[in-house]
Image (cartoon, rainbow, N blue to C red):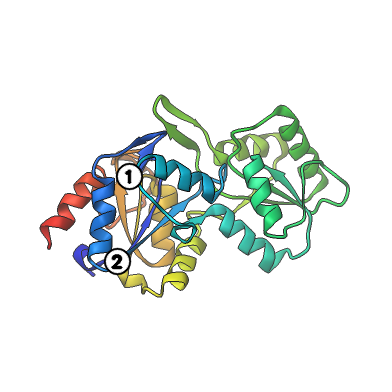
Amino acid sequence: MALADKRLFLLDMDGTLYLDDRLFDKVPEFLSHVRRIGGRYLFLTNNSSRGVEGYMEKLSRMGIPTAPEDYLTSVDAAIDHLRRFHAGKKCYVFGTRAFYGQLQTAGIPVTDRPEDDVDILLCGFDRELTFRKLEDACILLNRGVTWLATNPDWVCPTWYGSVPDCGSVCRMLTTATGRKPLFLGKPQPAMAELALRRTGFSPEQAVMIGDRLYTDVACGINAGIDSIFVLSGEGTEADIAQYGIHPTWIFSDIAALYRQLEETL
């Protein structure tokens, strides 16, 4: 299906719509275009460090009003996985207080101590990381608990460069313990598939948009939908050869995508 015929736009946020508190050019116009053609957009993020309310506040400050139903996060994917495959199991939450609170609100048994009855270590992007958490994680992993993680992203882009994301911290724990986690967010197809179920659009009508080949674009490919790789965040065109992941389209940023869509009207 041609780009002009797409109606469901699955949008990564960090590095795609903004960096830190700087909204990229033409993002409001792009979102207005999607609404004008009778389409729908959902914000998909692997970032588990803040709740949906935090994203709503952030985008509101940038002049973009949103509602909770406009979001799908790696926390949603984690909660869905825990309910389906580990119902009633206690999780040690390796992440922010917001991450912990979302899981607790969803009814997941959680703790922040390496207690004897912990069944699962669940790691997220932790902006509140301490050495005690790393030590707790090693204790649990050496004990043999199930290890889950929200996302394999190596870094989170910022205005000054990048900071270690969940994938980098998990790699550190793997080096220390020899264990490897099961990642639940992008590039796994679950978030995109959930988006299709929630909205009723077909895979052919959908497109995944993001700045990372190995998470955003790969999620689209794994879910059987087209993808757009934007070069406004972490990724570069050289990454295509490195990862062997080929997006359907490449744009420099959302502004370039918006101009292309406007030309098709």
Q: Residue at x 47, y 44 (%)?
A: 57
Q: Which residue is mark 1?
A: 241
Asked which secondary structure carries label 1, the reply is helix
Q: Residue at x 75, y 30 (%)?
A: 132
Q: Write down the quadrant of residue 169 in the picture.
A: top right
Q: Nearer the viewer, residue 39 or 238?
A: 39
Query: Residue 163's spot in the image, x, y percent?
Result: 50, 30
- Given the current orientation, which residue lies at the most extreme right position? 116
Location of residue 233 with respect to 187 vertically, above or below: above
Location of residue 32 with respect to 137 vertically, above or below: below
Q: Residue at x 45, y 63 (%)?
A: 192
Q: Nearer the viewer, residue 246 or 14?
A: 14
Query: Residue 96's spot in the image, x, y percent?
Result: 64, 40
Q: CA distance from mark 2 to mark 1?
A: 33 Å
Q: Residue at x 41, y 44 (%)?
A: 60
Q: Nearer the viewer, residue 9 or 161?
A: 9
Tell me if mark 1 has few (under 14), some (14-19) or many (20+) residues whose alpha carbon lies within 10 angstroms of its own. Answer: few
The answer to whether residue 127 is seen in the rendering is: yes
Point out the image quarter for the C terminus: bottom left
Location of residue 190 with respect to 104 vertically, above or below: below
* Callout count: 2
Three-letter code for the amino acid on which mark 1 is drawn: Ala
Task: State the mark number for residue 177.
Answer: none
Query: Residue 115's spot in the image, x, y percent?
Result: 86, 45
Asked which secondary structure carries label 2, the reply is loop
Point out the image quarter for the N terminus: bottom left
The answer to whether residue 180 is seen in the rendering is: no
Q: Which residue is mark 2?
A: 39
Query: Residue 108's spot in the image, x, y percent?
Result: 72, 58
Three-letter code for the amino acid on which mark 2 is drawn: Gly
Tell me if mark 2 has few (under 14), some (14-19) or many (20+) residues whose alpha carbon lies within 10 angstroms of its own. Answer: some
